């Protein structure tokens, strides 16, 4: 299923007047502050987010899974779903695949299909946290950190295989997330596990194509509950530095203990030129994988404030970031949830672009704490939705993506085409 421009134009028509009125007010307000609205629209339009192939179906928890019907059953259908998101939002221009869940049988045909939907392939993800049927060695006690050289060799080879698959699709990066760790004190040597992980990552890095980047995720716990080998950004950074210039740390917003100051981590990594990208989501307690911006929108804004500053003052030559969502949906229709996440990301970005950085630096220099807070919150409390909507509309998307999704009966059509009981590969 593919949405045509004419369908969206007809869908937008009745809402255009209302949108125009709110956009006029905001535009005048921004221009009176000396902001360049044309440049802002361009910056928003340029922000494209990769959709994770594993988030297009019902995620579920270990206690249950509730289907939505019409879920994509294969890679072609996943691409079609991301195509729908991109047509509606004009901000989901790529897809991030997880191997072996998404091995393309005919890469050329898959590339062609993606091009029809105006999509490219972002980072490919390896999976050494599950055993696959017929696999010689088990990852039950770790993969790249494992005590056994055979297990490590198998895990290294899997990552290289993921890179080769990514190359057939035009990907330029691999994201490595390891579940490796221990659930009980004494289970393994903390030092030995870290050392072996470093060696294994270096072995993968040695074969990384020159124009590729390797992203290393970190996460404090789950599935292991006593220690995780790559538990925090510092360990990830150390391992990335141990690999070489094309290895970077990837920040998944859900991979922190409660109340961690993520914007500070972002600032620190950018100062080192070692921030590779993001997995956006939101959480209250742990790696909850909830809709972006649903729990802590101010944190998201503060993260974007650091990003906007870091991209404008890029002294360490941090390369362009990989923007990805990593979410899971148990209650909401995944496509509606992803549309909400895409909107939340652009809203936070737009708000951060409004921050008067000069005035903020000045307030900081004068130790005017009150004013510094006022400056940030003035931007955060601006309703930038008309700006985000205008950027999307100018790019040919829907003024109101979720409303359009519902009014066009997209889920109903997907159920009709694919049935009620399809199950997407993924978690
Ligand atoms: C792990 O929690 C993670 O964030 C990693 O990115 C995985 O690859 C992804 O979730 C999907 O399971
Ligand atoms: Mn992740």
Image (cartoon, rainbow, N blue to C red):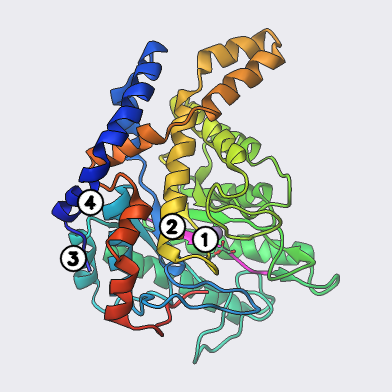
Q: Decide whether residue 176 is among the magenta residues.
A: yes
Q: CA distance from mark 2 to mark 3?
A: 24 Å
Using the image, tell me which numbered label, if any, was put on residue 112.
3
The answer to whether one can see residue 321 in this image is no
Residue ID for mark 2: 338
Q: Which residues are magenta?
A: 171-180
The answer to whether one can see residue 264 in this image is yes
Figure quarter occupied by ligand 1: bottom right
Residue ID for mark 1: 327
Q: CA distance from mark 1 to mark 3?
A: 26 Å
Above or below: residue 319 compared with residue 285? above
Q: CA distance from mark 2 to mark 4?
A: 20 Å
Which SS type dominates the magenta stretch?
A: loop
Q: Residue furthest right?
A: 185
Query: In which quarter of the view is residue 44 placed?
Result: top left
Query: Is there a contact, CB below 8 Å, between mark 2 and mark 3?
Result: no
**SS at badge 1:** loop
Rendered residue at 23%/44% (across/down) = 14
Above or below: residue 25 compared with residue 70? above
**SS at badge 3:** helix
């Amino acid at each position: 299923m593919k949405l045509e421009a004419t369908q969206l134009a007809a869908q937008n028509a009745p809402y255009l007047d209302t949108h125009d009125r709110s956009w006029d007010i905001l535009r005048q307000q921004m221009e009176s502050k000396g902001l360049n609205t044309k440049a802002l629209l361009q910056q928003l339009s340029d922000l494209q987010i990769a959709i994770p192939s594993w988030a297009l179906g019902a995620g579920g928890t270990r206690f249950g899974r509730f289907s939505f019907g019409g879920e994509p059953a294969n890679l072609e259908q996943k691409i079609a779903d991301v195509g729908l998101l991109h047509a509606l939002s004009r901000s989901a221009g790529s897809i991030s695949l997880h191997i072996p869940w998404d091995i393309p049988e005919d890469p050329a045909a898959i590339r062609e299909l993606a091009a029809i939907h105006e999509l490219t392939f972002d980072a490919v993800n390896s999976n050494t946290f599950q055993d696959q049927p017929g696999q010689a060695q088990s990852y039950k006690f770790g993969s790249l950190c494992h005590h056994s050289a055979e297990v490590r060799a198998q895990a290294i080879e899997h990552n290289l295989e993921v890179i080769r698959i990514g190359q057939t699709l035009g990907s330029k990066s691999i994201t490595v997330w390891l579940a490796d760790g221990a659930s009980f004190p004494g289970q393994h040597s903390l030092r030995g596990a870290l050392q072996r992980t470093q060696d294994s990552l270096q072995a993968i890095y040695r074969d990384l194509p020159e124009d590729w980047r390797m992203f290393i995720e970190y996460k404090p716990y789950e599935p292991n509950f006593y220690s995780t080998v790559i538990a925090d950004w510092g360990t990830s950074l150390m391992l990335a530095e141990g690999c070489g210039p094309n290895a970077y740390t990837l920040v998944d917003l859900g991979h922190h203990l409660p109340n961690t100051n993520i914007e500070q981590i972002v600032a620190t990594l950018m100062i080192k030129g070692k921030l590779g990208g993001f997995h956006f989501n939101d959480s209250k307690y742990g790696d909850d994988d909830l809709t972006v911006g649903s729990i802590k929108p101010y944190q998201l804004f503060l993260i974007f404030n650091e990003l906007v500053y870091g991209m404008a003052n890029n002294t360490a030559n941090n390369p362009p970031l990989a923007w990805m969502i990593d979410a899971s949906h148990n209650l909401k229709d995944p496509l509606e949830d992803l549309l909400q996440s895409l909107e939340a990301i652009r809203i936070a970005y737009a708000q951060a672009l409004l921050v008067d950085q000069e005035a903020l630096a000045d307030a900081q220099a004068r130790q005017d704490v009150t004013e510094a807070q006022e400056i940030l919150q003035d931007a955060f409390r601006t309703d930038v939705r008309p700006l985000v909507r205008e950027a999307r509309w100018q790019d040919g998307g829907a003024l109101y993506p979720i409303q359009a999704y519902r009014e066009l009966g997209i889920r109903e059509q997907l159920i009709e085409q694919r049935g009620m009981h399809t199950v997407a590969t993924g978690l």
